Amino acid sequence: MTSRVPTCILVVAILQSLAGSAHAAVNRSPVPVESLPAWVARYQAAVDALRAGDCARFNQLNVRGTLNLRCDAQTRRLSTSFRVLGYRQFGTGAIVDTIDVSRQTNRAGIYTAILALGPAASSIPWARAGSAP
């Protein structure tokens, strides 16, 4: 019985320390790698470089391939109607509403990009959902 008491005290101490660290983690929000306004400005600058046919500038802006675009004739043609309508950040995630042309249908529509701005953002591609008018 005496050996169980120190074990119980140790378990209680471990649980209390875990609860304290979990509480600290909840109160600490992750810091995005890039602010959303900076990402939107970089994306717009990349689209402008595409429109101008400046693939060298585009490649400078497309850090780690995070813009989900290619510098080619088809993307240049499709980017002519691109415009950011608005954006909103949720922690290290964000949504960006745009007017763009679908690569699949070649029709303009309003699209919502879902992206990660956090520390793992370089490994998470942004997703896009949309609708044609």
Image (tube, helix red, strand yellow):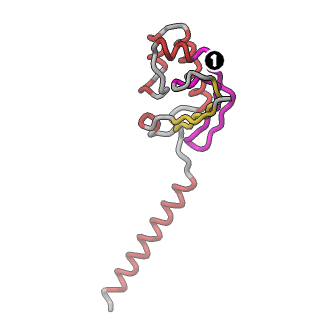
- Identify the residue at image location x=59%, y=38%: 94
Can residue 85 be found in the magenta stretch?
yes
Residue 55, given in percent of the width and then of the height, sits at 46, 11
Q: Amino acid at mark 1?
A: Ser
Q: How many numbered callouts?
A: 1
Residue 46, given in percent of the width and then of the height, sits at 53, 18
Residue 4, given in percent of the width and then of the height, sits at 34, 86
Is 90 positioned to the left or the right of 118 in the image? right
Q: Quadrant of residue 97?
A: top right
Which type of secondary structure does the marked residue at label 1 adopt? helix
Say above or below: 34 vs 57.
below
Residue that label 1 marks: 81
Q: Which residues are magenta?
A: 79-103
Can residue 53 be found in the magenta stretch?
no
Quarter the C terminus occupies: top right
Quarter the N terminus occupies: bottom left
Residue that protrudes farthest toward the left in the picture: 3
Residue 90, given in percent of the width and then of the height, sits at 61, 43
- Identify the residue at image location x=55%, y=34%: 128
- Local crowd size for mark 1, using a 10 Å CA cut-off: few (<14), some (14–19), many (≥20): few
**Nearest the eye: 49 or 20:** 49
Residue that protrudes farthest toward the bottom in the picture: 1
**Nearest the eye: 12 or 130:** 130
